[in-house]
Image: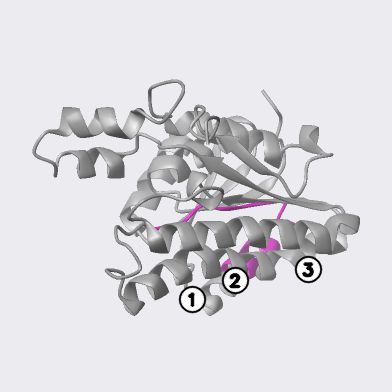
Amino acid sequence: MFSLRNKAAIVTGAASGIGAAIAESFARAGARVYVTDCNEAGAEAMARRIEEQGGQARLAVADVTSEAQCQALAARVLSENDDRCDVLVNNAGVGHVGTILTTEPADLERLWQVNLKGAYYLSRAVLPAMIRRRAGSIVNLASIAGVTGMEARFAYVVTKHAVVGLTRAMAMDHGQTGVRINCICPGRVQTPFVDARLKEYGDPADYLKQMVAPHALKRMAQPWEIAAAAVYLASDESAFVTGSAMLVDGGYTAGK
């Protein structure tokens, strides 16, 4: 396993799904993890689970759409870790179904605030400290929707393309500071959110087949498979990796 021993890490959207898997994997790799979510009960349960497994976790309740809350979170982490925030994972995100014609301005704004500006706010908050130490890793969660088009996912595709662009722009701007910025582009992942959506369809089994069909592996990913990529990008072993949009998509984009 790649080591994150003695690293302080923030993981947003960590109450469930991919974020929870990343937080748990980081703790197993030795990091002190700030389990961050606007869902206090979910984040508290995740932090407790990590501690019960012998890991180090801190509960951090924050809404990433609030610049003030992002600044306060960063200040707390830095004060508790001798001016260090070694790793930031901008995982918090939301989705929306619709074309440009059925996506209302409020829908697009909501995704823009969570998916992009949350990463923008927290990155701005921790980056100066990383630059001072000439070390740090920022990992953004993008999507296959950040590198290709998808039907009826207008707002999601737009914002995830923006996350890839944010990643590459930051990597170019700060490459000489010792800070690395990458993003992960997962294929479809079997999370509790996805499982709940499947139940809304008349024939969940048939819709599941439609969801997995574009993947070369003919299945969805499990959250821990995305978390493994995050551990690598957060670790010192990925020292020559920056500006990458890492595909962990089961071959979804291979034929596109």
Label 1 packing within 10 angstroms: few (<14), some (14-19), many (20+):
some
Q: From this viewpoint, is residue 37 visible?
A: no
Asked if residue 140 lies in the magenta stretch, the reply is: no
Which residue is nearer to you in this view: 230 or 36? 230
Residue 102 screen position, x and y as percent? 27, 68
Is residue 99 or residue 41 the one in the foreground?
99
- Whether residue 40 is visible here, answered yes or no, is yes
Instruction: Give the x, y percent position of residue 136.
Output: 77, 51
Question: Which residue is at a point 78% across and 41% down the rendered structure image?
Answer: 241
Instruction: Tell whether label 1 touches label 2 (CB within 8 Å).
Output: yes
User: Which residue position holds label 1?
Assistant: 66
Q: From the viewer's perspective, tell me whether residue 229 is left or right of residue 204.
A: right
Q: Is residue 93 left or right of residue 243?
A: left
Position of residue 96 relative to residue 19, above or below, is below
Q: State the separation of the CA atoms marked 2 and 3.
A: 12 Å
Q: For the residue carrying disc 3, how many other residues have a C-alpha within 10 Å: few (<14), some (14-19), or many (20+)?
A: few
N-terminal-most mark, 2 or 3: 2
From the image, tell me which residue sits under label 3.
128
**Where residue 144 sits in the image (x, y, percent)?**
50, 44
First to last magenta residue range: 73-94
**Do the residues bearing badges 1 and 3 touch, measured as CB atoms within 8 Å?**
no
The residue wearing badge 2 is: 121
Distance Cα–Cα, label 1 vs label 3 = 19 Å
Q: Amino acid at mark 2?
A: Tyr
Pinpoint residue 160: horizontal percent, then vertical percent.
51, 57
Q: Residue at x 11, y 33 (%)?
A: 203
Instruction: Give the residue type at disc 1.
Output: Ser
Badge 2: residue crowd in 10 Å (few <14, some 14–19, many ≥20): many
Viewer-proximal residue among 57 and 65: 65
